[in-house]
């Protein structure tokens, strides 16, 4: 088999791509889009329902498909979002090399590479065949709808299993929390947060009534399931995600209005939403109790636990501020006991910013902030344009906003059921940014 020459203008990091371009017209390469779409749809639909072993096999299949596709396709320009991800990968490699537990960190590095391969396949597929965005969303909503229905049904069944999530040492003692097929109310909430704004955009984007009914059902059931999870971080994330998507849709819809009303109407809308929220918190007792637990400080056992873990994580960061301990929960589990306070075992730092610092030090956090800024620029650029990627980009940015709010006090994001939806949002924003750049050129 002949190898195609690689143009000298290609970045050296990508010069291995396109080496098999002369085989690109073969029977397999012509079906790569279809195979990638099927694998990604199965992966996104099965996030809450498939076992970890099943998810691992689908992720492996996605990685192999991307590798094959990259070998058959000449390398293109590295986008801003992809560039920040490559920088974070480079930092993770360095952190692994200098880790006090290199073998454990290497396992985390392999996991990060597997997730990045899913992102790469998503980006490649969406750039080559944009209609697959709607199909992947449909698969994602199907899995979400099944999970939401299973969670809501738990309210009408035996509550003895649900009672294990009722903390007797919390000011919210007695609250019954649903968890659906994910076995954890906080994980259920984290899984639902990024999907809700995507469902709302699908409701607006899709044209046929059966499609819209499907999206509306997923949105309503998902919102109800998230509410009954009684996850405080989940509630805040849902408010941030749905509030962000609503605000961006309003800004986009009013972009041609007179200047005064274009500035005044969003402020009136936000004020009305805040007033409704205040009334709900003061009048609905379960909601009021759960919100008040946020203000209880160390008097609430959940708050007290997180505060102690955060203090230990800060000690870990101070011990290794520049490259951290290396990526992954395996490395964390080996190092954290050296810093933990008595009786406060933890599997993570319970804060995404702290986790980034623990794993890769200050450079890792700065790269994460750069990635977030790139996402904001990509999504914000769609507010004024007429690109077909405008609504998907707005949904993706709103989903990231919700994940960021929840991520301040939890690390549920690093679970595959949540993280893979985040990679889908990053791929959407990356493709939308590339499309915007091409149209501007």
Image (cartoon, rainbow, N blue to C red):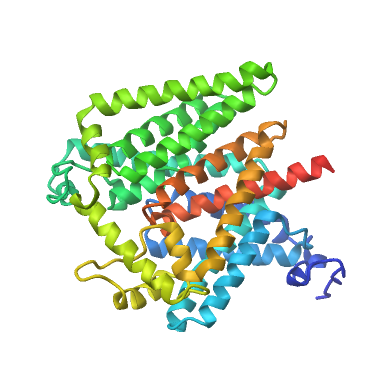
Q: Residue drawn 32% across and 64% down?
A: 311
User: In the figure, is residue 381 to the left or right of 20?
Assistant: left
Q: Residue at x 54, y 32 (%)?
A: 201
The image shows residue 15, relative to residue 419, as above or below, that is below
Residue 137 vs residue 178, the one in the foreground:
178
Count of numbered tags:
0
Establish if 237 lies above or below 274: below
Task: Examine the rendering and report whether any part of residue 42 can be seen.
Answer: no
Using the image as rendered, state which of residue 388 and residue 33 is in the foreground. Answer: 388
The percent position of residue 135, horizontal first and vertical second, equals 57, 41
Please identify the quadrant where the C terminus is shown: top right
| Horizontal side of residue 54 vs 66, given as left or right | left
Residue 382, quarter of picture? top right
Which residue lies at the image location 59% right of the left edge and 57% below the top edge?
119
Residue 111: give x, y in percent of width and height.
49, 69
Residue 234 is situated, as x and y percent measured from the top left of the image, at 36, 43
> In which quarter of the view is residue 217 placed?
top left
Q: Nearer the viewer, residue 302 or 7?
A: 302
Residue 116 location in percent, x, y?
57, 62
Decide if residue 9 is on the left or right side of residue 202: right
Residue under the point 57% across and 77% down? 94
Image quarter in which the N terminus is found: bottom right
- Left or right, 265 with respect to 409, comes to right
């Amino acid at each position: 088999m002949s190898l195609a020459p690689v143009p000298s203008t290609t970045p050296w990091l990508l010069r291995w791509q396109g080496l098999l371009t002369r085989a690109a017209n073969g029977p397999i390469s012509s079906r790569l889009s279809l195979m990638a779409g099927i694998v990604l749809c199965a992966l996104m639909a099965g996030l809450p329902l498939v076992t970890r072993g099943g998810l691992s096999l689908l992720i492996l299949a996605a990685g192999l498909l991307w590798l094959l596709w990259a070998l058959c396709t000449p390398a293109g320009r590295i986008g801003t979002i992809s560039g920040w991800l490559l920088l974070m990968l480079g930092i993770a490699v360095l952190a692994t090399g200098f880790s006090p537990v290199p073998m454990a960190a290497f396992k985390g590095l392999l996991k990060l590479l597997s997730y990045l391969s899913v992102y790469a396949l998503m980006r490649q597929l969406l750039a080559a065949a944009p209609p697959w965005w709607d199909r992947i969303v449909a698969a994602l909503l199907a899995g979400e709808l099944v999970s939401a229905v299973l969670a809501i049904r738990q309210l009408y069944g035996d509550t003895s299993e649900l009672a294990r999530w009722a903390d007797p040492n919390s000011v919210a003692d007695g609250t019954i929390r649903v968890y659906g097929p994910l076995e954890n109310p906080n994980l259920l909430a984290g899984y639902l947060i990024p999907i809700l704004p995507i469902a709302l955009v699908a409701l607006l984007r899709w044209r046929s009534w059966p499609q819209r009914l499907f999206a509306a059902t997923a949105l309503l059931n998902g919102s109800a399931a998230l509410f009954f999870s009684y996850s405080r971080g989940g509630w805040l994330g849902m408010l941030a995600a749905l509030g962000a998507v609503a605000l961006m849709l309003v800004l986009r819809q009013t972009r041609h209005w007179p200047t005064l009303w274009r500035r005044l109407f969003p402020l009136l809308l936000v004020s009305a939403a805040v007033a409704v929220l205040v009334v709900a918190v003061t009048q609905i007792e379960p909601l009021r109790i759960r919100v008040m637990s946020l203000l209880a400080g160390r008097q609430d056992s959940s708050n007290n636990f997180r505060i102690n873990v955060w203090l230990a994580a800060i000690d870990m960061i101070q011990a290794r501020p520049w490259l951290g301990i290396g990526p992954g929960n395996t490395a964390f589990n080996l190092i954290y006991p050296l810093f933990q306070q008595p009786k406060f075992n933890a599997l993570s730092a319970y804060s995404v910013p702290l986790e980034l610092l623990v794993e890769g030090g200050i450079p890792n956090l700065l790269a994460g902030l750069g990635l977030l800024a790139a996402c904001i620029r990509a999504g914000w650029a769609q507010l004024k344009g007429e690109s077909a990627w405008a609504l998907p980009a707005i949904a993706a940015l709103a989903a990231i906003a919700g994940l960021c709010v929840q991520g301040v006090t939890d690390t549920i994001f690093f679970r595959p059921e949540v993280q893979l939806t985040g990679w889908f949002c990053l791929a959407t924003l990356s493709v939308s940014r590339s499309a915007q750049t091409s149209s501007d050129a």
